[in-house]
Amino acid sequence: MKYVKRLVSFIVVLIVLMGAFSTVSFAAGEQYTENLIPAMTSNTNPSGKASASSIWSNSNEYLPWKAFDHSSTYSWASATKTGWLEYDFPDAKCISKYTLTSRNPVFSVNELPRDWTFEGWDEKLSSWIVLDTQKNIIDWKSGIKKEFTFENQNYYSKYRINVTANGGWVDVVIGEMEMMELAAPKKQVPTNLIAKADDSEITLSWDSVKDSTSYNIKRSDTLSGPYQTIATTSAITYKDNNVTNGATYYYVVSALDATGESANSNEISATPNKNASEDSTVKLSVLLNEGENIQLSTSYNLDNNKNFTWSSTNEAVAKVDENGKVNAIAEGTADIYAQNADGTFKEYIPVKVVKGVADELRLAAHLEIGEKAKLYLTDDASKVTWTSMDSSIATVAADGQVTGVKKGLAIVKAEMNGQSYQIYVRVNG
């Protein structure tokens, strides 16, 4: 009879006008998931379990699940001035936010919780752990939602609100209760993944991801995976030597940071082949002796190199420091990449390291006036015709040796088997 009186129409109208569906929030700054509790249709459906310390008059109208039905029209009501309302998840959650909504319409603001704790059940300790405590919450209105957040790093499957005092009414009533986890910020995904196929190798490169510590390189033999992680690197390039000429490989890359792994990048495919080095996309290489150094540049002012991220695709062959200075380590080939902070510029220069046949070499991509460097395209120099597009800045000999003449930027071209290749040489003076 008591609850029939609560439905008297003039009370409904009055309370709705006074503050229906208003929301008070105590949370700011952090991002949270949506409500993790499904819209319950019984204490156990569609999933999880709703329970409570007691039910008003043992009535089906005020069962626990009605506080989890995604509507404040119906509610849970206890049989006493205190009590608890619980929801058990099918699997553990790390809840760090919950909301309470008063019934709409509310019979009396004094039926609503005033003092309570929000708790998680620790299976190992077999006890309730207090996660949040609230005191003297009295500014309730009809249909109002209040949000409460707290720090929590532990996972529990059972959570409850334990009301120790209401406003003085004969029972505790909760129209709706929600629970949320802290949402992990969406991780940036590596972009602009590209692949360059050569003889028995494929070189990958991609744009750097801010705050990442490393990258997982994943490969598949079929389009769209499944992928297997084949390497982890801190560089933004990777050379895959475990490939077979003629076979097609599919790659994606993910970024790792202190909080975990991002989603995969765009997929790229490549097919290595024996004649890849003859392809028109091949660039000229800078030829170095083992132990020799070379200074690369992005402008005449070498200080600008510090504004770029430098990386090598094969540090066992050649390493590059943060200023663009390359150190030849051992025989082989490597690509040296330079990329600016926003990813709008990304370019590479191939480097070939040999033993004892390039002693006269010093600087290549960045020369001083009178200095020399040797360029490389193939072991058979007789197949190559070399030309400087501006011999007043840099000249090139028949064997690919370039000499800096005066300050400026020149293109050195090489022709082989009907294909034309080019590389920039910058001379400083």
Image (cartoon, rainbow, N blue to C red):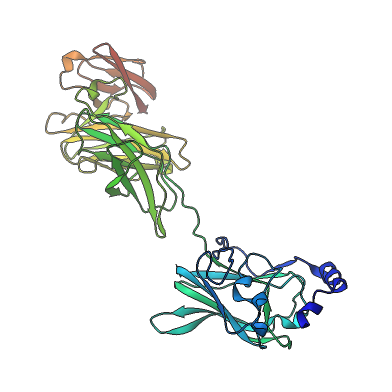
Instruction: Give left or right: position of 152 versus 334.
Output: right
Q: How many marks?
A: 0
Which of the two residues, 16 or 320, is positioned nearer the viewer here?
16
Q: Residue furthest top?
A: 418
Q: Residue at x 36, y 39 (%)?
A: 224
Q: Residue at x 32, y 44 (%)?
A: 226
Residue 323 visible somewhere in the drawing? no
Residue 304 spot, x, y in % from top left: 43, 39
Q: Quadrant of the C terminus?
A: top left
Is residue 85 depicted above or below 207 in this figure?
A: below
Residue 316 spot, x, y in % from top left: 20, 43
Instruction: Give left or right: position of 138 versus 58.
Output: right
Which of the two residues, 12 or 217, is positioned nearer the viewer here?
12
Instruction: Give left or right: position of 340 versus 57.
Output: left
Is residue 57 depicted above or below 193 in this figure?
A: below
Residue 428 lies in quadrant = top left
Residue 237 visible somewhere in the drawing? yes
Q: Residue at x 85, y 67 (%)?
A: 17
Instruction: Give left or right: position of 91 versus 200.
Output: right
Residue 203 spot, x, y in % from top left: 28, 35
Residue 330 lies in quadrant = top left
Which of the two residues, 35 or 136, is positioned nearer the viewer here?
35
Residue 114 lies in quadrant = bottom right
Q: Residue furthest right?
A: 10
Is residue 342 depicted above or below 88 in this figure?
A: above
Q: Residue furthest left?
A: 356
